[in-house]
Image: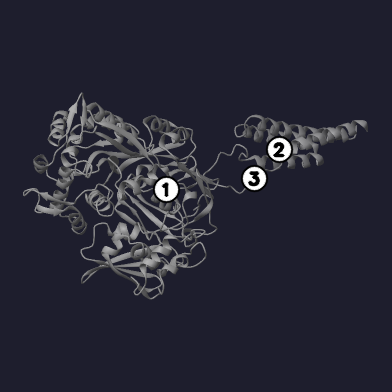
Amino acid sequence: MNKFIRLFVFLVFFFVLIVPYTMPVKVQAQEEVTELNILQSCDPPPPLRIYNVFYNPKPTYLIIEPLFWRSRGENKYYPWLATGYKEEDVGDFLKVTISLRKGVKWSDGKEFTALDVLTTFWCKGWVMEWWPITKYIDHMEAPDKYTVIIYIRKPPPLPWKKWFLTDTKIVSYAQYGQFAPGLKIPGKIPLENVDIDNLKNKLLNYKPDKFIGTGPYTYASESQTEWVYKLRSSYWVKDLKVTWKLETSKGTFTFGGGVPGYKLFDRIIWHRRISDPASWPLIMAGRFDFTWTGITETVYKTMKSKPGYTVITGSWLHGHALYFNCKKFPLKVRWAIAYAINREEYYKVAVEWGPESINKVEWPVAISPVDVSRWLPKDWLNKYIDKYEYNPEKAEQLLKEAGYTKKNGVWYTPEGKKFSLNIYVPAGWTGWVPGAENIATQLKKFGIDAKVVQFSWGMWHDTIQVKGDFDLAIDFWTYGLYHPFDSYNRFYVAYTVQGKGFHFNPVVEVPEGVSKYHGKVNATDLTYKLAEHPDDKELVKALAYITNHYLPALQMLEKKFAQTVHIDNIHCPIGWDVFLWYTPLHIEMGNSPSFVYGFIIASGLWQPKTSESVVKPTAAVPAGLSETVNATYKSVVSLAEDVSSLKSEIASLSDKIGALNSQLGGLTAAIVIEGIAILVLAVALIVTLRKPKK
């Protein structure tokens, strides 16, 4: 009897240890909390901003959405809060009829309708006086809840789709209808018999306690260094099962809320980029899943070779330009400074992620270097455009003609003061700061006392563009519309009439022969005309000449972007091979962070990588384990009834255990296999001992 007690204790011991490993395995599903970490600039930080979309707003990515998303590289407009639009010529107007998407809900549960669209355009255009709306939109109508009609004055401006379909993000009537008194559906804007000055004053002082949006996220928290989004419980893309198509030469790929597996990140943590250099160690350490910042060649090479990461590059459709305060520096002085700068030297230091991250500028006319020949003939360029190649002797001659004198290698103004100036540059920007320092070094070598001032981008607009409170500044020339209008609009509208900026008088003389627009012309008027007649190359010639000759800004170089992506944390349902190959989509990514967040993420082109989206290794639960364990128990029961079957059952189990060896690794395999063997042998021993002796 004692033998049987000891044997019983021995078997209990083994059952306690072995059974947990030999029982059929059930994987307990756990709720995965998915998170995306993004590096994004935000100056000033969110706590210093408010929940007013129209004045000093906190970031609204993935909260406030547009009617369409534009993809410049594809020359395509993806329908978003709208499902489509059609254009008609009707008398003095281009009539644009927009069909709104039905079933979209705001974060407060109310339905999205034409009332929201009219409220948005009214507040942004007629109340806040955004000039593209007031200048080009005669009126707007909403005949029903899901139709909006825009009447654009002819000829329609080149960027009207960008301005009105994508750049104007839609706000809630429930929140902003108080600034559109009497607005209803059916209805129209502009409203009549209202005190717009009073409405504007109220809107500027409006401080709601939250954003009401159609996007999938809301604010969870914010600080000086980061802000956190949490996912809403419902989102129209998924609820309405909306899909879009990516049409490529490799085939058509469908994505969106109607595709099985559509999922968004539970949380998005936005890390505020305080400066480029401060971000580089964190980027290389893999702290972020997506970055929107300038990087160095070292960072680029590190992330390009880092497992689980990739770097997407492409044309940034803009570049560096040296802006002049034309009030402080007369024309000959501007020319002299241009000739005193060796741009070849500048190119070596003003790069970001390597020598290939820039395009050099041969003809400084504020047009993309790769596209100049499409607009301006080579013989015309040679005749009328100055390359401003490095020529310190010519620079010296020009300064002397302007009344400046040089003593002991130092230049003095006509008033006898030391020629000193400050070069403003956005603080901490990769390529920009070294470029500004290089210009300062070159000007010092020439005899001008030049100093670099790193200035907060959050204060840039007010100080540089609006007030024009600077000497020289490194700022943008732009080509975002694939058209020269972009830079000329920036130069001769934004920095000339909307703000003091250049302190430049746009009324100038254009020589006969340069363009059919010659004699005394107004650069601002020519820019407006170019918006309305985008194919008129004579307008481009006149504005290119004005830019190059009168030099409110000297075009320096064109930039290329580089964005790091943590592909091991992001699932791309169309396949990363397709996404990374399809470069037309990358153009908008590089030039519009809101497109990355509001379209690529919200549409489901980028999703959290979860157990549902990725087949994970199954070493912990190998195929065949359940069948083998069940067979083991069957053998044990069978042995209890008939010990004679022991040999054949053990042989069968031996084969199955052997198969497990290739699927289980290390300690787990040893425990399972040994446990099964000992259990079978133990039961066999009991049965043998209990058999009556002959």
Q: CA distance from mark 2 to mark 1?
A: 39 Å
* Location of the C terminus (image quadrant): top right
Mark 2 vs mark 1: in front: 1
Nearer-the-camera pick, 221 or 315: 221
Q: Amino acid at mark 3?
A: Val
- Above or below: residue 587 compared with residue 408: below
Q: Which residue is mark 3?
A: 27
User: Considering only vertical position in the picture, is 615 above or below 56?
Assistant: above
Q: CA distance from mark 1 to mark 3?
A: 28 Å
Sequence-earlier tag: 1 or 3: 3
Label 2 crowd bin: few (<14), some (14–19), many (20+), radius 10 Å: some
CA separation in Å, label 3 and label 2: 13 Å
Quadrant position of the N terminus in the picture: top right
Specify few, some or many for label 1: CA neighbours under 10 Å numbering under 14, 14-19, or 20 or more: some
Which numbered disc covers residue 21? Answer: 2
Position of residue 532 measured from the top left corner of the image (x, y, whole percent): 20, 59
- Applied colour scheme: one colour
Disc 3: CA contacts within 10 A as few (<14), some (14-19) or many (>=20): few
Residue at numbered disc 1: 574
The secondary structure type at the circle numbered 3 is loop
- 493 sits to left or right of 239: left
Q: Secondary structure at mark 1?
A: loop
Residue at the image point whose x is 23% and y is 62% from the top: 156
Place of residue 324 in the rendered image (x, y in percent of width and height, measured from the top left): 24, 42
Q: Which amino acid type is shown beneath numbered disc 1?
A: Ile
Dot 2 falls on a residue whose secondary structure is helix
The answer to whether 50 appears left or right of 144 in the picture is right
* Residue 585 shows in the view: no
